[in-house]
Amino acid sequence: MSFVIEMRNIRKEFPGVVANDNITLQVEKGEIHALLGENGAGKSTLMNVLFGLYQPDKGEIYVKGKKVHISDPNVANELGIGMVHQHFMLIDKFTVAENIILGSEPTKYGQLNLKEAIKVVQGLSDKYNLDVNPMEKVENISVGMQQRVEILKTLYRGSDILIFDEPTAVLTPQEIKELMNIMKTLVQEGKSIILITHKLKEIMEVCHRCTVIRLGKSIDTVHISEATPDQLATMMVGRKVDIKVNDQAYDPKETVLDIRGLKVLDSRKVSTVDGLDLKVHGHEIVGIAGVDGNGQTELVEAIAGLRKIKEGSISLNGQDVTNKRTRKITEAGLGYIPEDRHKHGLVLDFSVRENIVLQTYYKNPYSKAGILNNKKITKKAKELIKEYDVRTPSELTLARSLSGGNQQKAIIAREIDRSPELLIAAQPTRGLDVGAIEFIHGKLLAERNKGKAVLLVSFELDEILNLSDRIAVIYEGKIIDIVNAKETNENELGLLMAGHRKAVKEG
Amino acid sequence: MTKILKNSNWFNIVVPMIAVLLGLLVGAIIMLLTGYNPILAYQSILESVFLQPYYTGETIRAIIPLILTGLAVAFAFRTGLFNIGVEGQLLVGWFSAVAVSIMFSGLPKLILLPLAILVSALAGGLWGFIPGLLKARLKVHEVIITIMMNYVALYTTNYLIKHFLYAEGEKTPNIPESASLASTLLSNISQGSRLHWGIIVALLAAVFVWFLLWRTTKGYELRAVGYNPHASRYAGMNVNNNIVLSMVISGALAGVAGSMEGLGTYQYMMINSTFIGIGFNGIAVALLGMNTSIGVIIGATLFAILQTGSITMQSTAGVPTEIVSIIIAVIIFFIGSSYIIRWCLLRLTKGGK
């Protein structure tokens, strides 16, 4: 049997690391083939070899049965291999059509033929149900739409083998659903897809076969119809994965966070949080469920003192913290795991050690009279690296060079170690692999069991359902209902998130 | 991963060295093409600077303001700001030091000298405060404002000298001895050079900058804000205050550089028809020194050697002093394009394996 892509016994070494060790990947025509592995398992390296960005040290690549030498991405393009990058490579100020044709523009008498370009792009969009407007500027379209422009770019260049690199990391649940449908359409039209991911749910939904990679080695290739998510997870991580669930009795203590009539404006002066009330008690996890853009970000930033409160009040541990400085609020007992760990959670060009004391550097014992005590800081950093299993060569390594999961562990170590009465975790596991998720969920539950209050904001309904005691559904800046996590399900939450409060109550 | 990290430390030292070598090499090629003898030229630079006490003294004298302006630029860089206004901050510092010395000439040296240096720091600091404040409050880019402030400084100091402190020879009167950094001892051992005690001030400033940045909580904050203002805000730091403070400290260092010229080298301030360039050279020194204190000292030394040596190079080898400007420019060019050097080195090490 011949494959559209066959990578045989690929080996790729970097100084000190074998990123790919004898990996074989065989993709059949018209299938969606998942490439599953934890962060750092070697998926991206393998795909970069296929795309011509790296040269393999050993091994052979066959495309459509012919042995090939892919010396650079242009060769890959000519062979019909297209990559949909995780981070989009688009020019904001250009229209969709201009972005798509960039690099191989249709011309007429040496002049750019934009009419032709728009026609071709529209045609492709219609054929694959992408629903993209070629005339729209990229800066005006949603993230999901931008991804479709990336897909169109590869189709325009005649690719019939598409590599999707973690395509759902940046998408909302709705957009993920749409992407899954697009991928199905693509393979129906005869394309083949390699999907790089560590999300089992997506694999189970759309993929035909799956190759699992762990620590640079291929573990197995399985038919999805014959596999269970548990099996895949075990293969990926190398041990049985323990899904953490909040199974303890609900026994709330005194109120830690008390929000009343909160009104917050966003940058466009629209009230994105609009009269919101919420209480979080000690010894409970309150999950905030909602569709992106219903005020979650603004709510959390208002609590942390990062966004001005227009009306209403917030009290933390009985202290009024409305419109107080961030540091005051932190000292009143707030721990905060921000949504964007690169932008808000870490100083990437600081060492792990320096990041560990980002909230406490000015306090005894880390400094005295304004002079840093590097010995104490190093000691604390080493302790936390060990306790929280942050995989880093040393505490002096830059945070930038850690994997996403380890960066997040470092943030969590820093925030939990201060033992805050209230811990806000905003999308704490976004983009992380199963092992890291398991670890982080365990830590959040442990905080709850210690009697702390935890406010969990997440788009992953599974995460909210598994961890929360109570679930508060946010819709258009208000909490429209609070349900007991053990008495609800995804359907009910889905309806609430869409604003159907009455329907749920009556039905 | 560890290997790459080790490499990047190694690169930080090797890249500037290669840039300097390439700069000297290009200088030599230009000399050959224009019919001069590069070996004789470089030899004359080295001989004068290292073997003739007068030129040694003048070299060390030239190092002093370069260290301070280099530190000023490096400090701002470290905190994420690009201070192009060092030249102007130096000029106001220079003028203020001279003016204070003349106005309070009755004070004893123990008070007047430190006062004059302090006032120069305050004046330079004020010149940095304005762009810092505009950046923090109104998001105006500091590069534009600092460039403009250079001109304001140049023409304001000229005006003030002309109208309030004018003496024969288009300059201010000389400062009193009680405000002077000049030293007959240093001058005598270097056969009459203008070497002065400012070298101690410059070296102390280098230690001060290193200590402030790497050993204090304030320095930690300044660096954090420089690298990532968002995360710093999330961690409860006051980002705006830190931006302003960073520009003030940078400006103060540049101001002190000015006082070194006024109280040490010249003992007065002249009316400058154009910029004197020590501030702009500070940018190059900081780049060459990779924004570290020790690097700035080394960079300042190299620049001072080239500049002082260029005089003997002209007299001995007949090479015009402008060649040195070309060499300095080429060094800066290669530092700026250090990416290319890195890439070549990586290729070479790979090939060697």
Image: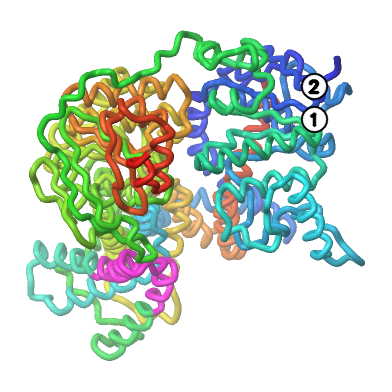
Residue B128 painted magenta: yes
- The residue closer to the viewer here, A429 or B189, is A429
Circle number at residue A61? 2
- The image quarter in which residue B341 lies: top right
- The image quarter in which residue A473 lies: top left
Asked whether residue B83 appears in the rendered view, the answer is yes
Bounds of the magenta segment: B123-151
Residue B213 painted magenta: no
Compared with A462, A121 (above or below) is below
**What's the residue at 48%, 33% (across, down)?**
A431
Answer yes or no: do the residues labelled 1 and 2 have beta carbons within 8 Å? yes
- The residue closer to the viewer here, A39 or B125, is A39
Q: Badge 1 is on which residue?
A: A70
x and y percent of residue B252 in the render? Answer: 27, 62
State the SS at label 2.
Answer: strand
Which quarter shows the N terminus of chain A?
top right
Question: Is most of the magenta stretch helix, strand or loop?
Answer: helix
Which residue occupies the extreme bottom position in the image? B163
**What's the residue at 14%, 66% (across, down)?**
B115
Badge 1 and badge 2 both on one subunit: yes
Specify which label sits upstream in the sequence, 1 or 2.
2
**What's the residue at 61%, 16% (across, down)?**
A212
Q: How was this image coloured?
A: rainbow
Asked whether residue B60 appears in the rendered view, the answer is no
- The image quarter in which residue A427 lies: top left
- The residue closer to the viewer here, A393 or A150, is A150
- The residue closer to the viewer here, B273 or A486, is A486
x and y percent of residue B58 in the render? Answer: 39, 58
Q: Nearer the viewer, mark 1 or mark 2?
A: 2
x and y percent of residue A412 in the render? Answer: 31, 30
Q: Amino acid at mark 2?
A: Ile
